[in-house]
Image: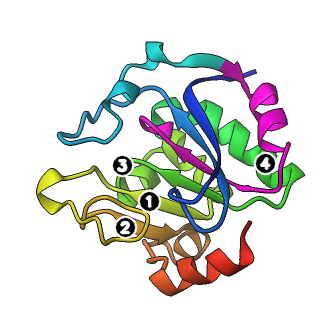
């Protein structure tokens, strides 16, 4: 059974994807982006070890969709892959994942790409302070992309998840 080091779980949030969501903030990130809004998440030891069963119970308590953020969930790829797989098999929850890795980097790694079939939207790319833009929907800097993961896996390349899709999700989700 995989354990995940979790810094925080925030229920009923609207900042990490469309509609009401439960966000799991993972501990651990090696990117250490200057200007990161969550630098306390960099150290994996700051989190509380939770097993996937415990997280499943918490995430299934309500009808909200789910976001993995951090830190960087891919710093703990095996645990988040197991969690996402179970969420997709046992619920109809929409799953977003934030990571500093680019989609192309994830595809090139068997370990990291194992998560992709269970993710609906990937917010990829490191936060770049010089490209910070508070007007962007669900991301912090202009280099970061919202990736439609199922479409990307079908096409074998990154397919952008559009603002229109995200706004429509506000009406369908939560």
Which numbered disc, 3 or 4, marks the residue that appears first in the sequence? Answer: 4
Q: Earlier in the sequence, mark 1 or mark 3?
A: 3
Please tell me whether mark 4 sits on a helix, a strand or a loop. Answer: helix
* C-alpha span from label 1 to label 3: 9 Å
Give the residue at mark 3.
101
Q: Which residue is mark 4?
A: 87
Above or below residue 52? Residue 168 is below
19 left or right of 89 in image: left
- Which of the two marks, 1 or 3, is nearer to us in this view? 1
Callout 2 secondary element: strand
Give residue 145's mark: 2
The residue pinned by badge 1 equals: 123
> Where is residue 10 shown, x and y percent of the image?
61, 41
Mark 3–mark 4 Cα distance, whole angstroms, equals 22 Å
Q: Secondary structure at mark 1?
A: strand
Residue 11 in which image quadrant? top right
Q: CA distance from mark 1 to mark 4?
A: 19 Å
Marks 2/1 in contact by CB < 8 Å: the verdict is yes
Sequence-wise, the earlier of marks 1 and 4 is 4
Nearer-the-camera pick, 158 or 96:
96
Q: Which residues are magenta?
A: 50-73
Q: CA distance from mark 4 to mark 2?
A: 24 Å
Q: Are marks 3 and 4 in contact (CB under 8 Å)?
A: no
Question: Which of marks 3 and 2 precedes in the sequence?
Answer: 3
* 12 relative to 54, above or below: below
């Amino acid at each position: 059974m995989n354990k995940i080091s979790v810094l925080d779980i925030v229920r009923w949030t609207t900042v990490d994807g469309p509609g009401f969501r439960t966000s799991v903030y993972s501990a651990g990130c090696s990117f250490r982006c200057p200007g990161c809004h969550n630098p306390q998440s960099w150290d994996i030891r700051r989190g509380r070890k939770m097993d996937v069963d415990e997280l499943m119970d918490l995430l299934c308590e309500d009808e909200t969709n789910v976001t993995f953020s951090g830190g960087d969930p891919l710093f703990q790829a095996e645990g988040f892959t197991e969690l996402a797989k179970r969420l997709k098999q046992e619920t109809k929850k929409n799953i977003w994942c934030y990571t500093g890795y680019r989609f192309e980097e994830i595809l090139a790694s068997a370990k990291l790409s194992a998560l992709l079939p269970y993710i609906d939207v990937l917010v990829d790319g490191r936060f770049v302070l010089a490209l910070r833009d508070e007007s962007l929907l669900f991301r912090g800097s202009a280099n970061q992309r919202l990736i439609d993961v199922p479409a990307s896996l079908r096409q074998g390349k990154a397919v952008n998840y559009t603002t229109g899709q995200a706004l429509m999700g506000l009406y369908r989700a939560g």
